[in-house]
Amino acid sequence: KRGHSTTLGIMANMAKRIDVGEKAQHRRLDVDAFDEDRFIEEETSDANAGAAVTARANEVKAFLNKNAHKDAVIKALEDPPVNTQDANIKSTNAQTVLEALTATKSADIPAIVSALNPEQLDILMKYIYRGMASPEKFNTAVLLAWHEKVVEAGGLGTIVRVLTGRKTV
């Protein structure tokens, strides 16, 4: 019986420590702010995003006309419109990126991928998956070649980050 009362005493003390509610002064960070149900989208100006996408598309086409495929891909991946809600802006930018990818020769892909940082690799992988979702528009064989080289450079973490990320391209 003595062990039983000791156990109850310990449990009562634990309950007192756990039941702090709003008095939790030991917290320096509001962990409840990270709850998925309380997620708030970032505000952006779609007008600025649309103008930036159009300007970038023109620059990418200029690079492609000069056969500067590496510069075209890097420019196309710059500042993607992930925070906009306008599907047309995202579609226009995806078209620009995928045109740059499909215009690149397969022999040039490893050099371009090796020049990208991990964040750019993740963005590139998002566009590769977006292109693969529309096989009637884009050459999936070329996209698979890009996919292979991106996974070699960025590892499986690139795939995981793309599939679990909230922001779409």
Image (cartoon, rainbow, N blue to C red):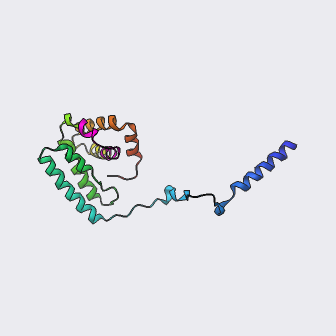
Q: Is residue 164 visible?
A: yes
Q: Position of residue 151 (x, y in %)?
A: 33, 36
Residue plotted at (23% across, 55% down)? 92
Q: Is residue 111 magenta?
A: yes
Q: Is residue 1 visible?
A: no
Front-most of residues 121 and 94: 121
Q: Position of residue 136 (x, y in %)?
A: 22, 44
Residue plotted at (31% across, 38% down)? 150
Q: Position of residue 138 (x, y in %)?
A: 22, 43
* Residue 32 vertical placement versus 65 (above, below): below
* Residue 111 vertical placement versus 51 (above, below): above
Residue plotted at (50% across, 58% down)? 37
Front-most of residues 126 and 60: 60
Q: Position of residue 21 (x, y in %)?
A: 65, 61
Magenta-tinted stretch: 110-125
The quarter holding residue 157 reads top left
* Residue 9 vertical placement versus 85 (above, below): above
The quarter holding residue 141 reads top left
The quarter holding residue 143 reads top left
